[in-house]
Amino acid sequence: MTEPQVETKQFQAETRKVLDIVINSLYTERDIFVRELVSNAADALEKFRHQNLIEKAEFDSHVPLEITIDGDDKKHILTITDTGIGMTREELETNLGTIAHSGSQDFFEQLAEAAKKDVNLIGQFGVGFYSVFMAAKNVRVQTRSWDGSEGWEWSSDGGGTYTIAPCPGLHRGTRIIIDLKDDAHTYASKFTLERIIQQYSTFVPFPVLVAGKKVNTVQAIWTRSKAEITDEEYTEFYKFIGNAGDEPLYRLHFSADAPLAINALVYVPKENFEVLGMGRMQPGVNLYCQKVLIDQHSENILPEWLRFLKGVVDSEDLPLNISRQSLQDNALVVKLRKVLTKRVIKFLNEEANRDPDTYRAFWKTFGIFLKEGVASDFEHRTELAKLLRFESSASEPGSMISLDEYVGRMREGQDKIYYINGSSRAAVEYGPYVELFKKRGVEIFYTLDPIDDFVLNHLGEYNGKKLVSADRADLSLPEPAVGADEAAAGTETTEPLAAAVLTSLCRWMKETLGDRIQEVKPSGRLVDSPAMIVNVDGYMTSSMERILKASGQSEVFGMGSKKDMEINGASPLIKKLASLRESDAEFAKDVVEQLYDNAMIQAGLLVDPMAMVRRNYRILDRAASERPASA
Ligand code: ADP
Ligand code: MG
């Protein structure tokens, strides 16, 4: 007989990094490597079960679906065997030699952070297998694919390399043989293993045998009646299905018979892993048919913006042998998605009313997904809009209100919903755009997230009321309530410029500013500020322009040009400018330029800082020389 050929291979650089992080992470929660391996075994069994429904397997078809765990207390060896789908040689190399994620710097930082804080979190990163090296001196993975091709053995000590060699005589599935580290001998003990399985893996839908004895009760919790399930069971199941270490924020368990038979159990986690630098999240809800997993992390049963949900959807109406590819345009699946999405939105609405504090926490963490939904999901846009929350001029700082609350207290004669974007509440409140709103007592939303304007722009209207950004040129606010303006006017003493002088000043300012501005106009809305920039195109706001510019897309939208500058004829500075223009035109131009730059900055838009600073020094110089120290 010839020596079987052993090939030695390098781990992909990213994989080595992951190994470093995982091996050096906290040992206090080392148990979780068993959970990760058992969950991989369960995944492999689910994959086989589904594959077998699509195309009856010929090879090893008699082998029962189960997971076997054995510890050798004397040799300190732990073996985990499954009769799942197995791996071909190629799959072995891709799955256990490389990592699926892009491996950005961010990814590694977050992984390292998670590993330090709570090892439980690393399952979320799609690198669960490598956690075995927390406890292993050496690992051998023997595997044979369901297709009956040759078996292989992968072996590594978690250093820089692994080997692959042929491994004859295997059944379908995968066996993982772990040579335990000296301080990890406990993982060969039957009692330790039973405890871990009971703690983490009770919901594995296949028998798990420890030393020949079945230790889990196989059950599909989502098909049971709500009244029979305890909170602990629900939470345990969440941890199992979401491969999660935290507790869920919300859970929704429901069943329906019409228009489709559905059993669904979905959870909202506490954490948003997408903001933790992991890139776009995979969907977290699995599709089952009569308790058989059809589509793990299904992209078809919920819209993309609900990808933060975890859980299970089971529908008896789907054909059992449906293939993943055909799910996408299956009419039943489309209907299922509709029903589910509506139900989830309804649920969130109920929760928002029932317990606003928890909803606030939810909104803070997952509001970004709902905003994505409003912007991208035409079908559910209107219902989703009920769930939106923003600060407003009438809300306490840091607290948020809904569109319904806003509409409920709109002033008489008000037919629009107003909003204005800004980097912070203070920035908005000091800015020129809200001056008239304050004066007239009209509520205005503060959209403090740069993407909010896109979202509201897509929404267009709510409850029949147009959504309007306050930096629009053609803004018209409801008339003042009787007495309100007079009262406010009492505090103002300055007489505005004569109309003819103001018109002429506007024309001259427009000449000075040239193409940067479409028009300079007397303002009907400024109260204290001398000037502001407004957008002529109704669909564009300054904050949208800023984002499009930053992402290099402003050309695509052909914008950035159509702006007016409004000036306040009652502002002392504007009045002085009118006479300065006669006495010192050169210097007056500097003032106009500076007014323009200031207004642009208040709109959140960029100015040329170098030119501005130079001009600013000229103005300061003049101010310093003209003002006697005693004044
Ligand atoms: P994840 O499970 O999140 O994909 P892992 O690091 O746990 O990440 O596993 C990597 C991959 O290795 C899996 O996606 C799977 O393709 C493969 N794999 C791991 N264990 C098994 C097993 N017991 N049987 C078949 N394939 C497996
Ligand atoms: Mg895994």
Image: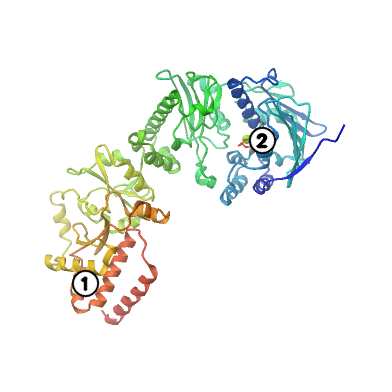
Residue closer to the observer: 519 or 184: 519
- What element does badge 1 sit on? helix
Answer few, some or many: residues within 10 Å of disc 1's Cα (few below 14, many 20 plus, some between 14 and 19): many
Q: Amino acid at mark 1?
A: Leu
* Label 2 CB sits under 8 Å from any ligand 1 atom: yes
- Closer to the chain start, of discs 2 and 1, is 2
Kindly indicate the quadrant of the structure image that contains residue 233: top right
Q: Quadrant of residue 218?
A: top right
Q: Mark on residue 577?
A: 1
Answer with the quadrant where ligand 2 appears in the image: top right
Badge 2 marks a residue whose secondary structure is helix
Where does the N terminus fall, quadrant-wise?
A: top right
| Residue type at tag 2 | Glu
Is residue 478 left or right of 594 when viewed as pictured?
Answer: left
The tag on residue 91 is: 2
Q: In the rendered image, which quarter contains the C terminus?
A: bottom left
Give residue 548's position: percent from left, percent from top.
39, 53
